Image (tube, helix red, strand yellow):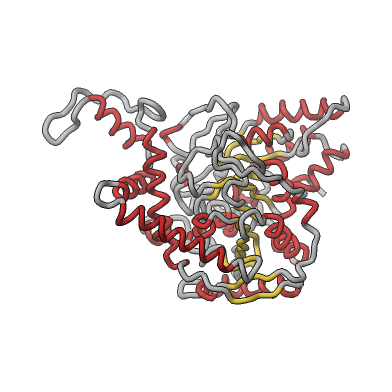
Amino acid sequence: MQPLEMSAVDLVAALRQGDITAVQCTTVFLDRIEATNGTINAFLTVDREGSLVRAADIDARRKAGKPLGALAGLPVALKDVLCTNDMPTTCASKMLKGFRPPYDADVVARLRQADAVFVGKTNMDEFAMGGSNENSAFGPVRNPWDLSRAPGGSSGGSAACVAADMAPVAIGSDTGGSIRQPAGLCGITGLKPTYGRVSRRGLVAFASSLDQIGPMARSAADCALIMETIAGHDPGDSTSLSVDVPRYTDLLDKPLSGVRIGRVPEHYAEGLDPEVAKGVEEAFAVLKAAGATVHDVQLPHAKYGIPTYYLIAPCEASSNLARYDGAHYGHRAEPGGHAKKAGGFESPLVEMYCRSRAEGFGPEVKRRIMLGTYALSAGYYDAYYAKALRVRRLIRQDYLDAFQSVDLVGGPVSATPAFKLGEKTDDPLAMYLVDLYTVGTNLAGVGGISFPCGFTKSGLPIGFQLQAPPLAEPLLLQAADRFQRLTDWHRRRPKAAGEVKA
């Protein structure tokens, strides 16, 4: 079996056994990136020289019998929202074009210590704000299953690069579904861990109470392998949970006998694509055949998820992105002349602030900053932001109540398969609704996993989602892994990028 066809688990085993060297493995994926990235645009930065130097060092240490990390030689792609001291971190924005952080994010440091090889940084929606990866300042990512369609977002580059065999594993971030939704649209597996399970230090913030980092790979087993490295307490992140990290890979191969899975009737409302609904129901049938039982559960406040999310997230974004003013951080506009009088800028400094932000941020980021600033302004804070926080607590309680009667909650990841590029860009509200089934996980702070459960007649992946109580990642991974042992949807590959119809 060739490296491009191997799982991350199998690649690590082959590297450890000497069946392939780190340099050989890295070169195969770098060559694949070179051949396909011009079409898919999944990577913003490719570090061919640096990754091969690192791979050669791993090979030399292995040959000398020196100790190596658990992922020694495994190629990994990083979403370009994670700080890396040896590659730019742009957040796919003109505001941070060329920015090179002085330190690694905690997740990056853990992967580096495990001797993973970073092949590059992946494209994304600007500052992780979007559901289609069309908001990138450096062009959209294309879905490898159909180049005319979006890969989902905001971790669209990470999802597309795994789907197109450009990397066996990628790291994404999930604020309202940004790991699970693109994983579903690209036919791969993506895990959004419990809030605090993985450190956010060095993740460029969008909405700090919602953001979480997680793995994206072919299978649940591959995600489990990566979680063993990236999960754990970080004293540098005040929201990081101080709990032990289990051996996720040792907990996978277990039957689902006695596992209760909730099915939410409200998920089957108007707007759910019939082919998606059929695929989801067939996924429930597979899980039942594996020993699980399925029970209807209620999430009565789920219908308020989108408006609640799109108040809280922009409010936090407004605060987090205030630092990018051209003086402290980010792009600075060229001097534009003297201060204007009536109706203009108050001073050259104010002009510089305004022009820097206008030039540096894209339309969607500006839209969310303005929404958040308005909702936080005097006279509106209690009516909007404070009320959204109260509804968020109700949504979280719905999940906690549901988990009293079931162990997992299942359903669709998105209402439709991958949509056409440009289809929703002129209608922000339609774009926001692509997060309908995913935002609740973030608002409640619980874990979720997405994996493929079928394909449409036109050959597009259908995603299935499971959600679990806080810190129940072992059960999420176990259930997804059992499903994948009984099906082959996750093993299917899109045609070579150049052969996919545009």
Where in the figure is residue 293, as x and y percent of width and height?
70, 75
In the image shown, does 284 or 186 lie closer to the viewer?
A: 284
Q: Is residue 348 left or right of residue 219?
A: left
Q: In this view, does 478 lie to the left or right of 143?
A: right
Snapshot quadrant of residue 479: bottom right
Snapshot quadrant of residue 348: top left
Q: Is residue 344 left or right of residue 429?
A: left
Does residue 90 show up? yes
- At a point 54% along the width and 30% down the height, the residue shown is 88
Q: In the rendered view, would you say 342 is above or below 393?
A: above
Where in the figure is residue 248, as x and y percent of width and height?
75, 51
Where in the figure is residue 252, as x and y percent of width and height?
77, 57
Q: In the rendered view, would you say 40 is above or below 470?
A: above
Q: In this view, does 130 lie to the left or right of 186?
A: left
In the image shown, does 372 or 238 lie closer to the viewer?
A: 238
Q: In the rendered view, would you say 406 is above or below 435?
A: below
In the image shown, does 17 or 30 lie closer to the viewer?
A: 17
Snapshot quadrant of residue 491: bottom right
- At a point 33% along the width and 55% down the height, the residue shown is 384
Q: In the rendered view, would you say 257 is above or below 468?
A: below
- At a point 71% along the width and 32% down the height, the residue shown is 113
Does residue 44 show up? no
- At a point 20% along the width and 26% down the height, the residue shown is 347
Where in the figure is residue 187, as x and y percent of width and height?
63, 58
